[in-house]
Structure formats: C-alpha cells, structure tokens
Amino acid sequence: MPQLMIIKALVQLLKGVILRVILLEKYKIGIQPQQLQNSNQILGAERSKPDQAAVVVKKRIIKEEEKKVQMNKFDNPKTQISFNQIYMGSRDGFKAKDFHSRCDNKGPTVCFILSDSGNVFGGFVTKSWKSQYSWEGDINAFIFSLTHRTIHPYYNQNNTAIKNDPNQSWNQGYGDISIKDRCNEVNSNTSWLGWSYALPHGFSFTETQSKTYLGGMINFKVLDIEVFQVLKKIS
C-alpha cells in the first residue's frame, strides 16, 4: 500500500478523528479548527515551530452516536482507503492485553495518542500486531506529530520498525514510541524520536528535545489512545 496514499487518507482522518478525540474548545494544543481546513498545515515535510500545549482540564470525547456521524466522514473514495476504529483506551481499557486483544492480526493500523502534556502524536504500520515478542521491519511505516504537524519515516533497516511485546501496547522503533501496560496510570511511557524513525530537521538524537518532541515530556501518561484499522475499499 503506497505510503503517499496512506498519508493523504491520514490527513482526511485527522480532520475528523482529532476533532473528535480532543474537543478543541476544551483542549488547547496549538491547532485551531480553521487550521484543519488546510491539509498542508496539518502535516508538512518541514518542521514547524513547537506549539504551546496547554494543560488538559477535562478528559473525554463525544457521544457514541456523534462518533458514528464523524466516522462517515473518514472514508475518502479518492484514496480507496477506509478506517475502522478497533481500539480506544478510555473505552476498552489501557492494559497491554486490552490493546492486543483488539489490535492483533488486523493488518495495517494507525494510532493516535494524547499525552498528559496535551501533545497528539501517533504512527502508522502495515504489519499486524502480535502478542508474541518479536521485531519487524516495515518500509512504509511512519510516525507523525499532530502538535507539530510533521511526519517521520522509518529509516533504520534493521527490522526495528515495530516491536511486538505482549506486556506493552503500541511500540514503534527501539524507543521512538513506547506505550506501556496501564499507560494511563504509569508515568513511564516514552517517545525518544530518532532511534528508528527520522528526526525533525536540525535535531540531534542526544538532545532532550528529541525525547520530548512527540509526547511533550521525557516520561508521560497517556490520556487516551485510539487505533484504527486501515482497509482498502472494494469497488
């Protein structure tokens, strides 16, 4: 599945999902509704200046019936890709087993993570998640930051795009995104960008900003996490 096609569909998904996942009138993460009208402002090739993420004051999303209405907007016939929500931490549980019971063996998936710093980030992989410990390569995988509107492709060819671990949740790279068991309770989730996925232009791997760029802090709690199965449409 071409990465460019996924990115185009991802932009469409971001317009609906993130507006739903984070009520912008409640959470201020530096992205305003009018900005989301221009997809070039959401995810670009160049790094934008970090947005100031405000403290999150309330934690939840909108009603189920409203979600169904929003889901109808995700399907983009031009891309021939649709999205099926298979996991939401606040609904299904934040344990690693909750993640794996709903996300394993689902094929390509995209994840959205909201940290307790107010940052929104995630990733896309084409390989299925598994409950058996293993590493896998994925040339089409990438990580994105909605807060900074950037995409970070997988560049390490040593089969480190995905880490399958039954005791952890979503893991990309050696430590680029590492979401732990009970990720909403533990302050040990990390997102040290640059291990297996490209750093923003001008960043150094050893600098603190590489460790805080995605999640906002070196260690953070997850306020919510959502995973969508990426499906090819049947015409």
Image: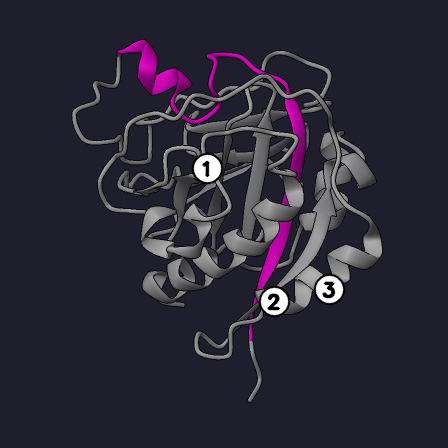
Identify which amino acid the numbered label 2 is placed on: Lys
Q: CA distance from mark 2 to mark 1?
A: 20 Å
| Mark 1 residue crowding within 10 angstroms, few (<14) / some (14–19) / many (20+) | some
Quarter assignment of residue 49: top left
Span colored in magenta: 207-232
Earlier-in-chain disc, 2 versus 1? 1
Residues under numbered marks 3 and 1 in contact, where contact means CB atoms less than 8 Å apart:
no
Percent x, y of residue 64: 83, 53
Q: Residue at x 41, y 41 (%)?
A: 144
Residues under numbered marks 3 and 2 in contact, where contact means CB atoms less than 8 Å apart:
yes
Q: Which label number is shown at residue 99?
A: none
Image quarter hosting the C terminus: bottom right
Secondary structure of the residue carrying tag 3 is helix
Secondary structure of the residue carrying tag 2 is helix
Quarter assignment of residue 101: top right
Q: Which residue is mark 3?
A: 69
Q: Which residue is mark 2?
A: 73
| Mark 2 residue crowding within 10 angstroms, few (<14) / some (14–19) / many (20+) | some
Q: CA distance from mark 3 to mark 2?
A: 7 Å
From what the image shows, is residue 22 above or below residue 124? Answer: above
Q: Which residue is mark 1?
A: 31
Identify which amino acid the numbered label 1 is placed on: Ile
Q: Residue at x 53, y 38 (%)?
A: 134
Q: Residue at x 41, y 28 (%)?
A: 176
